[in-house]
Image: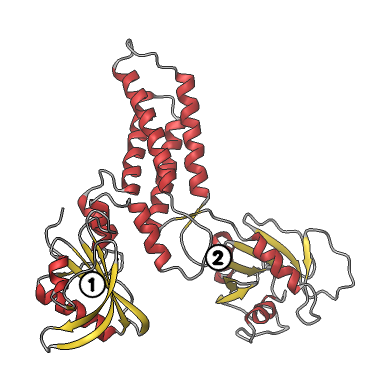
Amino acid sequence: MPEDTIVAPASALVSQAVGIVRISGSKSFDFVKDIIFPEKLPEPGSFSYRKIIDFETKNILDTGIVLVFKNPHSFTGEDSVEIQVHGSPIVLNRITELLVKKGARYADPGEFSYRAFVNGKSTISELELGNVITNAKSFSETKGITKSIDRIRKSLTELVTELEAAISYPNYTDFNETVFNDKLSNLVKMVKSLLESSTIPGLPQVVLAGPPNAGKSTLFNHLLGFERTVVSDKAGTTRDYVKAIININDREVEIVDGPGLDIDNPDSGQDLVKTLISTSDLVLWMDPEENPVNINNNHLFIKSKSEGQTDTSNNWIEVSVKEKIGVDRLKEALIKSLPKHEFITTKRQYNILTSLMDAVTRANNSTEFDIKAFELNSALKMVSELDGINCPTETLKNIFGSFCIGK
């Protein structure tokens, strides 16, 4: 357990109504008592109104709320105090400076969270989720992957134990290969389900695609509310992609307007739009002629430039910005078609989950016990990277070093 006491602003250093300074460590109570009046701290688990005193100038720096947490009942699991004052960066920095002069140390990025992990207050995945939520641009009903990791770890541990016992002591175990393989198949399904239900935080990306001069830029400008891209009757006007964040039916999405796909005249722009189509969350394929096309991604078909007088198949949504036809229906369909991810993951977690999926799949496909054991043990190490149990110290420092200073 760390011996020194750390301090940092726990809220952003911007002008706001309320700002917070957090201090954690064995000397927290002593240091804070020297900068408040009255000097008596509130009882642990409670808060009181106090004047904040600049002991160098003897002036009242500010007034605010002092909250006291006695170990282990705090975020970090240590003695901790939070001082809530007016959200002036000057005030927050001065309070921090005063506590440093009393003997505290400026916290490193993510150090409060690191101490919470070391003291058993939270897992890495829970702390990463909190950091993601702190930086989120929009709200969605999401949750972290901690419980799923626990289930995967339990299943993996059981499989590794059974398999290694069968390898080392084949004459003394009642190993049932069929039952084992069924359990392994279920594990693969479990990891696959978690991976497919996870998303790296960020706004969903919607790509407008289709043949040249299909009306993509017209729709893009309409959704945006002003002319951002050039609209022309001449095919191929758009040579690069343009993107913007747009609020559609109370949900923020990133709309991308890319070059038209012209099969007869391939160029670099064609590769660009193909990449956009393959990596987006949703493709709006626009074509006034309703020509059939195969899109290997989540998509909606849009019959653009419609005059509202033609029959169209159920697979195509008729839209005309000029005639004000079908735009509201398109917006509703767009929101409904966006993927609904249940779990928030960081890029680090997502990459590990992908490698974990590869490992358990290789184990499941192999008929050799030694290969199965190797892949399953590799997968178990990856789970340790996800939740931090038995994770190397340097890896932990890299993870928490990406957090905010006051986290």
Helix, strand or loop at label 2? It is: loop
Report x, y in % for residue 252. Answer: 57, 71
Name the one closer to the observer, 368 or 56: 56
Residue to which mark 1 is pinned: 8
Disc with the residue nearer the chain's start (2 vs 1): 1
The amino acid pointed to by label 2 is Pro
The amino acid pointed to by label 1 is Ala
Q: In this picture, is 183 found above or below 148?
A: above
Left or right: 357 as drawn, with respect to 171 = right
Q: Which residue is most to the top?
A: 171
| Label number found at residue 204 | 2
Q: Quadrant of the C terminus?
A: bottom left
Q: Which residue is depicted at the point 33% across and 32% down?
A: 374
Q: In this picture, is 128 found above or below 191?
A: below
| Label number found at residue 192 | none
Closer to the camera: disc 2 or disc 1?
1
Q: In this picture, is 39 found above or below 387?
A: below
Report x, y in % for residue 18. Answer: 35, 79
